[in-house]
Image: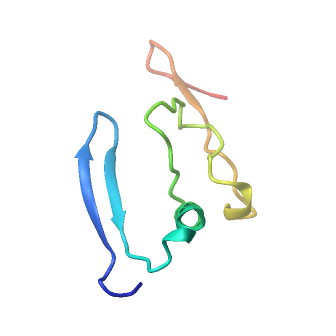
Amino acid sequence: MAEPSPFVLQTALNDFNVSYELNAYSDRPQLMPKIYSELHQNIQDYCNQASIEILSPGYSSIRDGNHSTIPGDYLPDDYTPPMFQVHRPDNQSSKK
């Protein structure tokens, strides 16, 4: 429903992420599972289109050189992962 207007609350500052709560109203509570599913899919789609990766706090990765977790359909045709660099103790870099 458009009224009352939907709103977002920031509900927590966790160790590695921020928690948000989206509040909206429906006059069709029997459709809540479908509404939640479509809402979650739309959030993923819009974040992917904006090149925003949604990662859980437990996700661990070296971001320099790894392929994006954004589905390939959302990446530009000429996307290539950035070069991975290793710095040796003598301060020289070694490109892989």
Screen quadrant of the C terminus: top right
Residue under the point 33% across and 87% down: 3
Confirm whether residue 54 shows in the render. Answer: yes
In the displayed structure, 1 sits above or below 55; it is below
Residue under the point 43% across and 35% down: 57
Q: Nearer the viewer, residue 45 or 85?
A: 45
Q: Residue furthest bottom?
A: 2
Residue under the point 69% across and 56% down: 79
Q: Residue furthest top?
A: 89
Q: Is residue 9 left or right of residue 58?
A: left
In the displayed structure, 90 sits above or below 60; it is above
* Count of numbered badges drawn on the protein: 0
Image coords of residue 90 (percent x, y)? 45, 13
Image coords of residue 60 (percent x, y)? 51, 29
Screen quadrant of the N terminus: bottom left
In the displayed structure, 41 sits above or below 25; it is above
Q: Nearer the viewer, residue 3 or 61?
A: 3
Q: Nearer the viewer, residue 10 or 83?
A: 10
- When asked about the image quadrant of residue 38, the answer is bottom right
Q: Say how the picture is coloured.
A: rainbow
Confirm whether residue 46 shows in the render. Answer: no
Q: Is residue 6 left or right of residue 40?
A: left
Image coords of residue 33 (percent x, y)? 57, 61
